[in-house]
Amino acid sequence: GNSVTQMEGPVTLSEEAFLTINCTYTATGYPSLFWYVQYPGEGLQLLLKATKADDKGSNKGFEATYRKETTSFHLEKGSVQVSDSAVYFCARSRVDTGRRALTFGSGTRLQVQP
Amino acid sequence: DTAVSQTPKYLVTQMGNDKSIKCEQNLGHDTMYWYKQDSKKFLKIMFSYNNKELIINETVPNRFSPKSPDKAHLNLHINSLELGDSAVYFCASSQDGVTGETQYFGPGTRLLVL
């Protein structure tokens, strides 16, 4: 299948805390993996991506490593800010559609308190 | 310059009506998508077009009909609207629709069926 499972939220952290949002995917094929972020009232924006095993995507202090052995793509940030409050979606490309279209996880809401 | 734009941003209508949502991208991309985000923030692909040709048609009621007059536009027409159609509809585009590509999302159309 093409499913993606990510931890349920909301995740509530204090500013400067360490963030981990877990994401695992089904191992069908060789997908590309993505993290998208949705700020309140806006559309989705790509945060980072990785296209093959052991690749690390990084952007704005966020990182995620494509782990084929554990079929995971966990999102981490060393020190979160209030402005990071948003909903984070893990996604994988779908191999059944020529890799077109994405399958998304259910989203994890992050709330960062000052 | 907005890369992917959608109109309208909000749409409130009565059950049984017919409505259209429009999407335009000025990125020169070949592939466009419609996603539906339900009240629990779960995102699911509905349709995808590549160079005006339908390539993905998920299990969507045939009351939903996409139309791509050219590769920069992908519109969504919905007949006989039902309460369950209330959701946020996102348009997206990508260069060729192959693996690893970033998809660029529009701001969403918030549809409420009363």
Image (spheres, coloured by chain):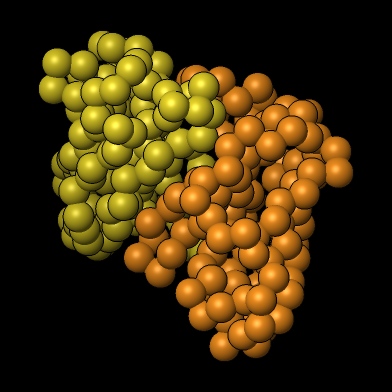
Check the image and report above or below for A111 versus A63: below
Which residue is at 73% across, 71% downward? B19
Q: Quadrant of residue B85?
A: bottom right
Q: Left or right: where does residue B37 sit relative to residue A10?
A: right
Q: Quadrant of residue A20?
A: top left
The foreground one among B70 and A53 is B70
Place of residue B30 in the rendered image (x, y in percent of width and height, measured from the top left): 73, 28
Place of residue A56 in the rendered image (x, y in percent of width and height, measured from the top left): 31, 17
Which residue is at 55% across, 49% downward? B46
Place of residue A111 in the rendered image (x, y in percent of width and height, measured from the top left): 27, 60
Which residue is at 46% across, 36% downward? A102
Q: Left or right: where does residue B3 sit relative to residue A100?
A: right
- The answer to whether residue B2 is seen in the rendering is no
Number of numbered discs overlaid on the protein picture: 0
The foreground one among A23 and A93 is A93
Check the image and report above or below for B15 versus B62: below
Which residue is at 73% across, 75% downward? B18
Tell me the colour chain B is drawn in: orange
Check the image and report above or below for B96 versus A43: above
Q: Left or right: where does residue B104 sit relative to residue A52?
A: right
Residue that lies at the very extreme toward the left in this rendered image: A70
| Screen quadrant of the C terminus of chain A | bottom left
The foreground one among B95 and B57 is B57
- The answer to whether residue A20 is seen in the rendering is yes
Place of residue B42 in the rendered image (x, y in percent of width and height, measured from the top left): 38, 56
| Screen quadrant of the N terminus of chain A | top left
Of all chains in the rendering, the one displayed in yellow is A
